[in-house]
């Protein structure tokens, strides 16, 4: 296939003039996409990446299950009059295809209430539905049928996480064997592992079920099948791409990933610059920009007054926002809290998570009235005020595939203090080792290292360097448009190399 697409250069405007033939057509398959349905970070990615690809001139359709949540969130995709027909799980099914077009992206919903007409996306609270293998194999299988009935012939099939990982295995029977297959791994810890008893319910041909592709350690493993069958693999940061090839962070698939190492690409997620914009964020007391950090100071004052905090005049305000879990190093925050307060610093913590960590944070912070603010809960508006007012943003994660918090913090002028892992390592450059540094990076996940990093931060606060650092980090380009350009380039280069 010889298709020149518009996203393979720099600058969205200049790209629109270089079209020679039709744009690349991308078919994405995923279990969630904001604003229709969102459980976690995956929903954010599928909500934004397709729109940015369209902005670069590509054609994108996204196939999703039709869950009740779509309606709860105020969306009413329209019937297309088309349906997908197949026998799955021993039942002959006809599922209507619904459509909503958003910013040029065509979202197609497979309406099969038997599988998807349930309250939770993945299961009841804290659990998973027992027929997950059957549900998501149906998604993969019908995604291809949907693209056919919608007369969309894709050049690239882009699957996300284990839920969509079987889709490449249905291509041949769907008569779409020449399509380029890309799989993005957002979190390797979730693989879709099932007892081999599920095999007959997956609607796969004997060519697949009788071969080794589906199996790992005696189980059916959706993600493994995707890893083996995709032409290219991507994950959400270059460092995480390397980390998942090690036994330490490979969750049992590191050997298979090492085998495919030449086909693995680490492409950083971005943040939506329209959604995260201190110049227009209504949650902030005063809008501000890199050219006007004096206004940021007013947000800081307001935040401190609102939370009843009084840092010493020479002491910074540290913040942590996130899930209070071991992965995020929330326990380390609890350990260093008394020491930070002893140096007159203030600490703001916002999050929910592990009840044990919540309890210890409550206990430790109680005596430090006026120096520590702990909010157990999810509060987006408060989070925005914290990003726009704190001096330093703590992310002592033990592992972090990409991480959004540090990118939002930088956009809002809060200097990140991060552990050197995954996407944190890729997005924050240490101020000491790099004259264009953007934060403080430390190596070991222990209280001493975090405390030493906070000590360095206090030094920077005292010597007045923040005035120079804040505008610089606010102007970094961690936008989705940048990430989308990388995907556009990967699609076109891989299509050319694979002769598709
Ligand atoms: P995760 O692994 O949880 O997806 P990320 O850093 O990638 O971590 O993204 C976390 C996102 O969720 C950020 O936008 C952060 O601001 C937001 N967030 C996390 N916890 C809270 C909370 N308690 N209140 C408000 N926003 C939160």
Image (spheres, rainbow, N blue to C red):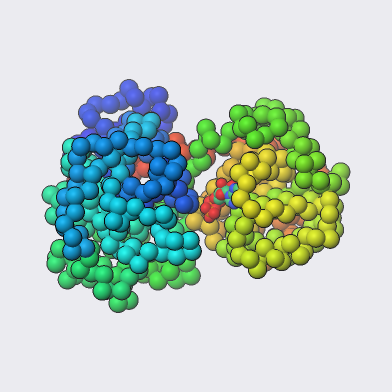
Q: Which residue is drawn at the image coordinates 40% and 58% (left, top)? A: 122
Q: Residue furthest top?
A: 17
Q: Residue 152 at x, y = what percent?
A: 21, 38
Q: Which residue is drawn at the image coordinates 38% and 31% (left, top)? A: 103
The quarter of the rendered structure image containing the C terminus is top left
Where is 5 relative to 351, above or below? above
- Residue 279 placement: quadrant: top right
Q: Residue furthest bottom?
A: 218
Q: Which residue is drawn at the image coordinates 14% and 67% (left, top)? A: 206
- Report whether 159 appears left or right of 270: left
Q: Residue 119 at x, y = what percent?
A: 41, 54
Q: Which residue is drawn at the image coordinates 32% and 70% (left, top)? A: 194
Viewer-closest of 299 and 419: 299
- Report whether 28 appears left or right of 279: left
The quarter of the rendered structure image containing the N terminus is top left
Q: Tag count in the figure? A: 0
- Report whether 102 appears left or right of 341: left
Viewer-closest of 340 and 33: 33
**Would you say residue 263 is visible in this rendering?**
no
Q: Residue 179 at x, y = what percent?
A: 21, 47
Q: Residue 276 at x, y = what percent?
A: 56, 36
**Would you say residue 114 is visible in this rendering?**
yes
Viewer-closest of 341 and 450: 341
């Amino acid at each position: 296939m010889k298709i020149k697409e518009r996203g393979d250069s720099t600058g969205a405007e200049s790209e629109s003039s270089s079209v020679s033939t039709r744009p690349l057509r991308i078919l994405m398959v995923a279990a969630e996409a904001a604003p229709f349905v969102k459980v976690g970070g995956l929903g954010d990615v599928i909500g934004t990446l397709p729109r940015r690809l369209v902005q670069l001139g590509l054609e994108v359709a996204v196939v999703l299950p039709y869950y009740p949540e779509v309606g709860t969130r105020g969306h009413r995709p329209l019937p297309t009059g088309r349906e997908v027909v197949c026998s799955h799980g021993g039942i002959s099914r006809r599922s209507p295809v619904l459509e909503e077009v958003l910013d040029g992206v065509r979202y197609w919903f497979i309406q099969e209430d038997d599988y998807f007409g349930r309250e939770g996306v993945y299961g009841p609270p804290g659990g998973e539905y027992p027929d997950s293998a059957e549900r998501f194999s149906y998604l993969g299988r019908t995604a291809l049928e949907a693209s056919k009935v919608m007369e969309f012939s894709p050049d690239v099939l882009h699957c996300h996480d284990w839920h969509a990982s079987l889709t490449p295995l249905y291509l041949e029977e769907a008569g779409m064997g020449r399509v380029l297959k890309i799989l993005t791994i957002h979190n390797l810890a979730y693989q879709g592992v099932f007892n081999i008893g599920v095999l007959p319910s997956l609607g796969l041909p004997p060519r697949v079920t009788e071969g080794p592709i589906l199996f790992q350690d005696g189980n059916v493993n959706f993600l493994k099948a995707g890893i083996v069958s995709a032409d290219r693999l991507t994950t959400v940061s270059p460092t995480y791409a390397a980390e998942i090839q090690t036994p330490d962070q490979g969750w049992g698939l590191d050997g298979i990933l090492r085998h495919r190492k030449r086909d693995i690409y680490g492409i950083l997620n971005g943040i939506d610059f329209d959604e995260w914009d201190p110049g227009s964020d209504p949650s902030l007391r005063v809008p501000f920009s890199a050219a006007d950090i004096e206004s940021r100071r007013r947000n800081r004052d307001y935040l401190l007054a609102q939370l009843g905090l009084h840092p010493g005049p020479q002491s910074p305000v540290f913040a942590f926002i996130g899930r209070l879990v071991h992965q995020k190093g929330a326990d380390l925050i609890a350990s260093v809290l008394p020491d930070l307060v002893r140096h007159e610093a203030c600490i703001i913590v916002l999050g929910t998570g592990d009840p044990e960590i919540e309890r210890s944070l409550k206990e430790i912070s109680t005596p430090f009235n006026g120096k520590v603010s702990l909010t157990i809960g999810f509060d987006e508006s408060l989070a925005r005020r914290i990003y726009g007012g704190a001096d330093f943003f703590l992310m002592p994660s033990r592992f972090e595939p990409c991480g959004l918090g540090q990118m939002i913090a930088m956009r809002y002028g809060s200097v990140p203090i991060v552990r050197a892992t995954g996407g944190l390592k890729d997005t924050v450059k240490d101020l000491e080792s790099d004259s264009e540094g953007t934060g403080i990076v430390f190596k070991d996940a222990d209280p001493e290292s975090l405390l030493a990093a906070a000590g360095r931060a206090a030094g920077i606060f005292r010597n007045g360097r923040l005035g120079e650092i804040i505008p610089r980090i606010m102007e970094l380009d961690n936008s989705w448009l940048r990430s989308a350009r990388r995907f556009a380039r990967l699609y076109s280069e891989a299509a050319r190399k694979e002769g598709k």
